[in-house]
């Protein structure tokens, strides 16, 4: 060890973060104590390291100054060449709260003989195995306390969620600072955006409207597609809340209603949930339906499928793409991509004429369905089964907790019921989406279509309600032939 009357160059380390703020030690206070300790021991602080707002308890979190201090200790000097022979800290838990970090610190400090270490209580000899062991034991105790705090925090969040109490932090866009009362102008924009999404309008178009209107987030930033999507997908919109990725439900499986004012009704949010959930993982589904992330350029892109047979007898089924043809009326064609691009290259048809024919067929189908909708009650037919299963699941759980049934019986049965309940809830959200969209399709759908009030993305959404796909059969015989609608085979969603 270094003699007491020797002026020892040491560094000081300070840290304050969310899990230590309750101790009322600010960084300046910590460094003041460190300076007093160093002065009392006759040491000289040559550099101060500070990792403010960085928890020492989180795995994977990098503390830049802590890492820089370890490098300086290992080298025995600062980057400018100033010698370093020790460290002074307020307390061990300000330095490390993970055993691995403590071991790395001890290894760096004791890399050479004669290094010193002290906290507010006085110097410690980290070369002693007993002292090092006590330090590790202190880290373990500290980690246990951190885990207790984390568990208490999780329980608190869960309890608040079950009581429908808003969480802390900044207000959400659409609500005032009390997090309960709607902010009228923002809520109006949210409600309109939600209903536009349900009607089939793309997020890209909605985002452009918000940006042109100069809307900002609660942090004063411009809206982006992701932030807009998350705002609309938040169940807070209809008065519900998620916790750990799941809707918070009561003992009967019913979503807990929060204390804040809703922007839209639950069925509308369930429709939005169905739309965004369907977009996860795929753009084009096996049935030929597509999801629009941007406003598309053509009405039937991806909906038209090539019906030409390949040499092996299999139907091509590749989605037709758009190519410009200034020599044709309408100026474009739908055509099958080349073999190199996954198609057969053997089908091409006048785009404007196909759009006109399919539009008329779809409008007729939607008008027919709208007429039927007036006579049919829009109720989901799985509600009774869902209620029965959730009740049965509660009884099964109670029996297992009372040791009335074995683990071998409980877990397989519960797993089967959980899967079925999950499937039923998914079907309910899909039903809500169909109902909400159908409510916008009235007897005047033709008038809406031709009035330019609907964007192309909304028209495509209406088409996908009516159609899975349209199979385009080959003309045959070569050369240009008159447009033949009989070579278009619609695959209606109800067929």
Image (spheres, grey):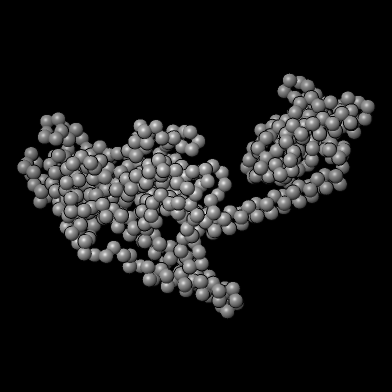
The percent coordinates of residue 174 (x first, y second) are: 44, 44
The percent coordinates of residue 56 (x first, y second) are: 69, 42
Quarter of the image with the C terminus in it: bottom left
- Is residue 337 toward the left or the right of residue 149 in the image? left
For the point 46% across and 37% down, the residue is 217
Quarter of the image with the N terminus in it: top right
> In the rendered view, would you say 407 is above or below 162?
below
The image quarter containing residue 323 is top left
The percent coordinates of residue 433 (x first, y second) are: 33, 55
Q: Is residue 4 visible?
A: yes
- Is residue 177 toward the left or the right of residue 276 in the image? right
The image quarter containing residue 216 is top left
> In the rendered view, would you say 246 is above or below 51?
below
Q: Pick whichever, 450 or 70, lies toward us.
A: 450
The image quarter containing residue 148 is bottom right
- Is residue 113 toward the left or the right of residue 494 in the image? right
Q: Pick whichever, 335 or 53, lies toward us.
A: 53
The percent coordinates of residue 320 (x first, y second) are: 22, 43
């Amino acid at each position: 060890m270094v003699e007491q009357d020797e002026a020892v160059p040491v560094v000081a380390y300070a840290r304050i973060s969310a899990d230590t703020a309750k101790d009322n030690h600010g960084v300046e206070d910590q460094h003041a104590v460190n300076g007093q300790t160093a002065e009392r021991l006759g040491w000289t602080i040559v550099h101060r390291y500070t990792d403010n707002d960085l928890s020492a308890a989180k795995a994977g979190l990098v503390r830049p100054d802590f890492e820089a201090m370890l490098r300086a200790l290992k080298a025995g000097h600062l980057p400018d060449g100033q010698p370093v022979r020790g460290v002074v800290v307020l307390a061990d838990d300000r330095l490390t709260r993970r055993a691995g970090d403590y071991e790395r610190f001890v290894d760096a400090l004791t890399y050479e003989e004669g290094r010193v270490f002290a906290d507010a209580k006085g110097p410690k000899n980290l070369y002693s195995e007993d002292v090092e062991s006590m330090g590790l034991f202190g880290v373990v105790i500290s980690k246990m306390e951190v885990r207790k705090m984390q568990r208490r925090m999780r329980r608190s969040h869960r309890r608040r969620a079950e009581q429908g109490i808003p969480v802390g932090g900044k207000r959400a866009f659409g609500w005032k600072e009390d997090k309960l009362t709607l902010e009228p102008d923002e809520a109006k924009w949210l409600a309109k955006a939600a209903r536009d999404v349900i009607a089939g309008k793309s997020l890209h178009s909605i985002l452009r409207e918000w940006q042109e209107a100069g809307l900002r987030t609660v942090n004063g930033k411009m809206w982006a597609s992701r932030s807009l999507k998350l705002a609309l997908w938040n169940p807070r919109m209809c008065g519900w809340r998620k916790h750990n990725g799941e809707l918070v439900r009561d003992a009967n499986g019913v979503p807990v209603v929060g204390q804040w004012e809703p922007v839209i009704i639950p069925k509308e949010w369930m429709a939005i949930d169905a739309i965004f959930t369907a977009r996860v993982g795929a753009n084009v589904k096996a049935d030929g339906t597509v999801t629009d992330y941007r406003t598309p350029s053509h009405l039937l892109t991806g909906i038209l499928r090539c019906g030409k047979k390949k040499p092996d007898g299999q139907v091509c089924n590749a989605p037709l793409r758009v190519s410009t043809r200034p020599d044709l009326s309408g100026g474009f064609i739908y055509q099958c991509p080349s073999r190199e691009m996954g198609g057969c290259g053997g089908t091409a048809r006048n785009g404007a004429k196909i759009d006109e024919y399919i539009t008329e067929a779809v409008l007729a189908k939607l008008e027919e369905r709208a007429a039927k909708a007036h006579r049919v009650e829009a109720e989901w037919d799985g509600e009774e089964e869902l209620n029965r299963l959730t009740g049965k699941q509660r009884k099964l759980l109670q029996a297992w907790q009372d040791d009335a049934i074995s683990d071998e019986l409980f877990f397989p049965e519960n797993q089967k019921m959980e899967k079925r309940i999950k499937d039923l809830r998914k079907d309910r959200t899909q039903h809500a989406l169909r109902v909400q969209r159908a409510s916008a399709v009235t007897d005047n759908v033709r008038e809406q279509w031709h009035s330019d009030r609907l964007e192309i993305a909304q028209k495509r959404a209406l088409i996908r309600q009516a159609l899975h796909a349209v199979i385009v059969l080959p003309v045959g015989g070569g050369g240009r032939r008159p447009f033949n609608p009989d070579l278009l085979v619609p695959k209606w969603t109800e067929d």
